[in-house]
Amino acid sequence: MKILVSVKRVIDYNVKVRVKADHTAVDLTNVKMSMNPFCEIAVEEAIRLKEKGIASDVVVVSVGSKSCQETLRTALALGADRAIQVETEDGLDSLSVAKLIAKVAQEEAADLVIMGKQSIDSDNNQTGQMLAALLDYPQATFASEVVIENGEAHVTREIDGGLQTLAITLPAVITTDLRLNEPRFASLPNIMKAKKKPLDVKTPADLGVEVGSNVSIVSVTPPPQRAGGIKVGSVAELVDKLKNEAKVVS
Amino acid sequence: MSILILAEHDNKSLKPATLNTVTAATQIGADVHLLVVGFECQTVVEQASQVAGVSKVLVADNAVYEHQLAENVSKLVVDIASGYGHILAPATTTGKNTLPRVAALLNVAQLSDVIKVESADTFVRPIYAGNAIATVKTTDAVKVLTVRSTGFDAAASTGGNAEREVLSQVIASDRSRFVKEQLAESDRPELTAANVIISGGRGMGNGENFKLLEGVADKLGAAIGASRAAVDAGFVPNDLQVGQTGKTVAPDLYIAVGISGAIQHLAGMKDSKVIVAINKDEDAPIFQVADYGLVADLFDAVPELEKSL
Ligand SMILES: Cc1cc2nc3c(=O)[nH]c(=O)nc-3n(C[C@H](O)[C@H](O)[C@H](O)COP(=O)(O)OP(=O)(O)OC[C@H]3O[C@@H](n4cnc5c(N)ncnc54)[C@H](O)[C@@H]3O)c2cc1C
Ligand SMILES: Nc1ncnc2c1ncn2[C@@H]1O[C@H](COP(=O)(O)O)[C@@H](O)[C@H]1O
């Protein structure tokens, strides 16, 4: 079974985000970039399936400028076999990304595509669902457990009310939630080995996909700041403030 | 052109997030239609037809829709999409599961987690865990959006009298099958609709200690929430997680207990009206957003709080 995992390069989750003074975008100059945390979980799940003998081949794909090759190398160091960069400008919209990945999934004849549920920069939570729709595949989003047997994936999903389990037939798309697994760290020897693993570069034209979007950014502004509060000295003072000042407790 | 909203429900009752989405739709303008897709969901249809501002309720009631599988529902929505300029759903796990499929099938973008309507084609949404606010304009023929309920007041649940239309399409996928679900049962208000929330973090130490929060919650009629660390550690189930990748809440009062205040947690609660933090570390970042901060050991402060309410 062949698994395709898509990984995105994003601002590191520890970085304090700043909006550019001209309010056109977030400032990404000299900011630490990393693999999107949900994509790390996706890579980890694929590698575990390979270690269990369920998957034979793990291919990783990223859509973006040359710098996303760094993220692909990280995935290779974690255990993926091959990588594909689809060379585009950064920040392409989700539908275009989904169209590109759909073509890669078809060319690779992947049996399963595992993606993150959400990018922590755009917070879109949609690319996996769009990909599944374009390929007319079943989907299981927000996965916290994946069991593959008899050509089906039994996926436990984190939903608002609790947990739901679906059985979907392969080929399919799964998106990862936080509790699916705990990603490993790449070891130094594996980082060295990853440099020799194959990494292909393709263009949207190679894949026959036209990218573009009808959505434009009008502005990007900092969020409203909360006025600073106060420290109270005791529980009694807290209760008094809540009753008589904030009037949120009767 | 009319606006179509995918109603959030569990076949028994219409969920409050639908009402906030109706308000967003009313701000866009035009005629608002609610689509109820489910099975034996007659009471939901009754409730939906009474929502103020809704002119029509479309009903697809069939066993194949019982679990609202994204494969089926998205195709149904696309089937009836012509004539609609906007298609909306609440930004719940159901809406987020289904609507991007609708957008892709229509070959248009989806705008996620809209918190403000500027005009019929321009919308505001948080990005980077709410550390930046983007205003975006779309010229897509059909605008597909999920709506964050904290951004909009709830429409009145009564006062409307919508006409009903029954949809006969039966769209079923044989490649996705519901197996089971484990739903949390609680007498407390739903997290995303509660006026008061008390949340616990890693500082709670274990799941048993969440009983301390229950005592306070009982007195305040509050819902209970949690940080990711508390969920990861198995103290409480995943449906309690508040944050960038959990639930977004904005109650009148949010009490954070033993939570440090990581940006991913703040993303889910910093629009609350009044924030209280109880933490023994006076430098915990949660104090930067708290209106009232109490530096104390929670095992002393929480029982005392329960007693003094
Ligand atoms: C991709 C991604 C997504 C994430 N999404 C979310 C999300 O949706 N929601 C979320 O919450 N987090 C999320 N996180 C995790 C987030 O970064 C933090 O790790 C998490 O919020 C920390 O939880 P915490 O505050 O409970 O734990 P900690 O940071 O460990 O804080 C525990 C606090 O308890 C205090 N404490 C300990 N004992 C006591 C005591 N006896 N009395 C009083 N205070 C005490 C300590 O002083 C400390 O401040 C995400 C992270 C990533 C990478
Ligand atoms: N540019 C990209 N390259 C590769 N994968 C991506 C890209 N953008 C999004 N994805 C995938 O889609 C998931 C969800 O992203 P999003 O829909 O943007 O929140 C991510 O976790 C990735 O797996």
Image (cartoon, coloured by chain):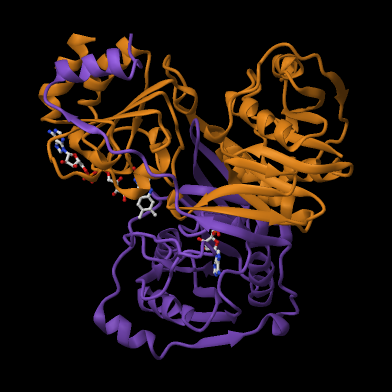
Chain colours: A purple, B orange
- x, y percent for residue B172: 77, 41
- x, y percent for residue B182: 47, 30
The residue at 19%/16% (across/down) is B305
Residue B29's image quarter? top right
Q: Depth check: B136 or B165 in front?
A: B136
Ligand 1, by image quadrant, is top left
The residue at 77%/23% (across/down) is B54
- x, y percent for residue A55: 49, 68
Q: Quadrant of the C terminus of chain B?
A: top left
Which residue is farthest front?
A: A22
Q: In which quarter of the image is the N terminus of chain B?
A: top right
The residue at 51%/61% (across/down) is A23
Asked whether, in this view, residue B235 is left or right of residue B165, the answer is: left
Residue B59's image quarter? top right
Q: In this view, does B149 lie above or below B135?
A: above
Asked whether, in this view, residue B224 is left or right of residue A89, the answer is: left
Which residue is farthest bottom?
A: A196
